[in-house]
Structure formats: structure tokens, C-alpha cells
Amino acid sequence: QVQLVESGGGLVQAGGSLRLSCGASGRTFSRYAMGWFRQAPGKEREFVAGISRGGGSTAYADSVKGRFTASRDNAKYTAYLQMNSLQPEDTAVYSCAAKEYYSGAYSGKQYDYWGQGTQVTVSS
């Protein structure tokens, strides 16, 4: 089992950047493909980005391609989401998730473990 804790959210002006971090407990972090999701008020949770266990493969939602970058540091048991050119429509609670033993970058919703989330607010 793994526990996930997000950090790095906050308030930023449109056009700005934030980097989210997702820290994982335990020493089995490299077993997990990692994903980032977001949920805005009144909307369903949606996939944002995924990254494979070794970091060599990534997947992105069309809405964030070219602006967001997923990465990970297995030695630090941490995944990251670099978010650039943020827009008000990116405002949401962002959560990371882990899927055990998946070989690629997973863009579905069947993740095994979820973090609590961190709020990202983009002002216009």
C-alpha cells in the first residue's frame, strides 16, 4: 500500500505557473504508474496527465498538452506536475494517483491509490 500527499497548490494569476508535488510513502514508488487528476466545482473528476513507472512515457489530456508536464523522481518517491500558462479554467482540486504494476502511462480512472488533493486557483 502507498500513501500519497500532494503539495504546491495555491493562487496564481492567469499566465502564471505552479509545480505540484506528490510524495509517496514507502520504498515501492517505482512499482506505480502515476497520474494527475482534477475536479472543478460541479464537475466530474477528469484525467490530466499520466507517467509510467520509469518516467519514459507520459500521457496528457488535450486541454493541457503543451502547457503541463508530468515527471517523477523515483529516488525521492515523488511525482511532479509542472503547470505553465495557467488559465482560469484550470482552477480545480488536483489529486495524484498511483496504479501498481502498470507498464505505461495510464490515462484511465482505475487507479489503486489516491491523494487528498491540493487546490489550484487561477485568477483572471
Image (cartoon, grey):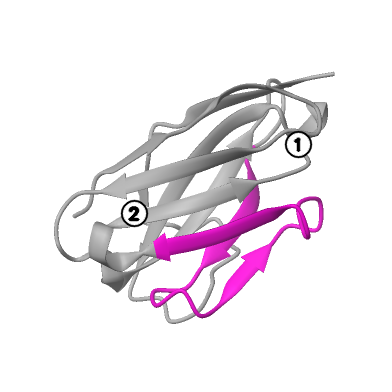
Q: Image quadrant for the C terminus? A: top right
Rendered residue at 41%/76% (across/down): 102
Q: Which mark is residue 86?
A: 1
Depth order, front residue of 82/44: 82
Can residue 28 be found in the magenta stretch?
no
- In terms of secondary structure, where does tag 2 sit? strand
Q: Measure how far apart labels 2 and 1 are at the Cα level.
A: 22 Å
The kind of residue tagged 2 is: Thr
Q: Is residue 9 left or right of residue 69?
A: left
Q: In this picture, which residue range is highlighted in magenta?
A: 45-72
The kind of residue tagged 1 is: Leu
Q: Is residue 44 left or right of residue 87?
A: left
Rendered residue at 64%/68% (across/down): 59
Q: How many marks?
A: 2
Can residue 58 be found in the magenta stretch?
yes
Sequence-wise, the earlier of marks 2 and 1 is: 2
Q: Is residue 74 left or right of residue 14?
A: left
